[in-house]
Amino acid sequence: MLEVRGLRFSRNDLPVFGPLDFAVATGEALLVQGDNGAGKTTLLRVLAGLLRADAGEVAIRGETAEPLLRARALAYLGHLPGLKADLSVVENLQHLCGLHGQRGSQTIEGALEVVGLGGYEEALSRQLSAGQKKRLSLARLWLSPAPLWLMDEPYANLDLEGIELVNRMVRAHLDAGGASLVTTHGAYAAPPVRTRLLVLDRRGRDGAPRTEG
């Protein structure tokens, strides 16, 4: 699904990470671990095309990851929810699906039930708690037709039930032929799926990716 070779990124002439070499197969999750400042978020933003790498190659299903290919193949869940405060829950999802597409087998109402927001359809985004906003962002991810999910600290702001929700979503996505990158600083267990591990330290060096079950 994803292959990375020699990927390197610097900020203000200081190395953040790299060079990194790793791959993620269909039906597999790559868990990216590291302390704060190790470059986990930056790595996902580079893969999503939001930041430009200093060097290296990124391929998706064997093709060079040009912007249009990334837009079709990648769905990015970042720290910020990316919601419009004065739109309702349904309006936010309609807007985001209009921009990024919608998986044909899914409906907005169904996605809201999946993430536990059934009954909140008309609530404004600004009225939601931090955990509910995260669930709304997860609903958008669930609706995405992209096969590769980039999930930056997806467990943040969630209770134990929400953590299990993320695990169920990742498992279902992988079972359907998708793949995922999930960042964590190590405070949470990995999703109970076929997982490879990439560890970044504060100087951006990586440990060798390995399979964890």
Image (spheres, grey):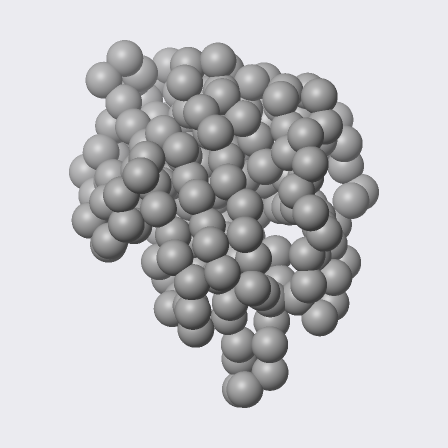
| Residue 128 visible at all | no
Q: Residue furthest bottom?
A: 13
In this view, 73 is above or below 174: below
Q: Is residue 201 left or right of residue 120?
A: right
Q: Using the image as rendered, state which of residue 160 and residue 207 is in the foreground.
A: 207
Q: Residue at x 60, y 71 (%)?
A: 16
| Residue 39 visible at all | yes
Q: Residue at x 60, y 66 (%)?
A: 17
Residue 130 % position (x, y): 59, 44
Q: Residue 53 is drawn in which quadrant?
A: bottom left
Residue 156 % position (x, y): 66, 43
Q: Using the image as rendered, state which of residue 3 and residue 121 is in the foreground.
A: 3
Residue 168 % position (x, y): 58, 18
Q: Residue at x 68, y 63 (%)?
A: 205
Q: Residue at x 48, y 13 (%)?
A: 175
Q: Is residue 138 left or right of residue 185?
A: left
Residue 20 % position (x, y): 56, 57
Pick the quarter of the image with the C terminus: top right
- Counting the numbered discs, the total is 0
Pick the quarter of the image with the N terminus: top left
